[in-house]
Image (tube, rainbow, N blue to C red):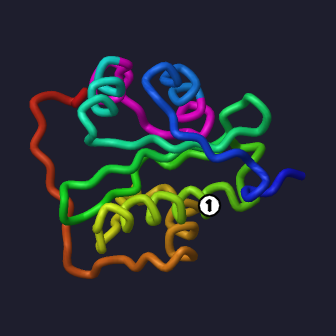
């Protein structure tokens, strides 16, 4: 069994998109491959400096990924996905810690994550990493279309 700390941490780029997309699918994430999760948007967001994508590799295989973003005040841990064969081995916890480290290096003192109601394993992972459910915030969104 390979533990999360025995995997190689890598910064990912636009050329890694297909591997990231495949991993998101394998992990069961709801994705919008023709909208905000498209190859074009992925590349634009990395090039524009609005996101950093970190991954963990076992040999040459991407087995975990996280998208780290911030607005200058608050950081976000987004799109955390771990291949089912590598779950519960520390990979997710390691990526959360690396995302936090990256954000703290940039002077960001608040780190948040949005987790869908159905995703109890992710909720447990983040709570185990010290995240707390905010009792009085409701997430509202306004979109140009369902794909953004």
Q: Quadrant of the C terminus?
A: top left
From the image, give the main secondary structure of the stretch colored magenta. loop
Q: Who's the residue at 15% across and 28% down the image? A: 145
Q: Position of residue 110 (x, y in %)?
A: 29, 72
Q: Is residue 107 inside the magenta stretch?
A: no
Q: Is 89 or 34 nearer to us in this picture?
A: 89
Q: Is 7 or 39 nearer to us in this picture?
A: 7
Q: Residues within 10 Å of mark 1 (few under 14, many from 20)?
A: some
Residue carrying label 1 = 94
Q: Who's the residue at 29% across and 78% down the image? A: 134
Q: Who's the residue at 71% across and 44% down the image? A: 84
Q: Which residues are magenta?
A: 23-39
Q: Is residue 9 above or below residue 110?
A: above
Q: Is 41 or 87 nearer to us in this picture?
A: 41
Q: Position of residue 38 (x, y in %)?
A: 35, 21
Element at label 1: helix
- Asked which quadrant contains residue 51, the reply is top left
Q: Position of residue 15 (x, y in %)?
A: 49, 19
Number of numbered discs present? 1
Give the side of residue 30 with respect to residue 140, left or right. Answer: right
Q: Is residue 52 above or below residue 120?
A: above
Q: Who's the residue at 62% across and 33% down the image? A: 26
Q: Is residue 32 inside the magenta stretch?
A: yes
Q: Is 105 or 130 nearer to us in this picture?
A: 105
Give the side of residue 2 with respect to residue 143, left or right. Answer: right
Q: Position of residue 46 (x, y in %)?
A: 33, 33
């Amino acid at each position: 069994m390979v533990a999360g700390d025995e995997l190689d941490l890598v910064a990912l780029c636009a050329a890694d998109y297909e591997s990231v997309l495949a991993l998101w699918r394998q992990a069961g994430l709801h994705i919008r491959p023709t909208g905000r999760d498209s190859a074009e948007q992925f590349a634009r967001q990395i090039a524009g400096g609005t996101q950093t994508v970190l991954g963990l590799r076992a040999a040459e295989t991407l087995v975990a990924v996280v998208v780290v973003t911030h607005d200058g005040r608050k950081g976000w841990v987004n799109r955390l996905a771990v291949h089912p064969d590598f779950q519960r081995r520390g990979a997710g916890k390691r990526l959360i810690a690396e995302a936090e480290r990256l954000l703290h290096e940039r002077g960001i003192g608040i780190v948040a994550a949005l987790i869908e109601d159905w995703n109890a394993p992710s909720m447990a992972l983040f709570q185990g990493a010290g995240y707390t459910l905010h009792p009085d915030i409701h997430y509202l969104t306004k979109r140009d279309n369902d794909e953004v």
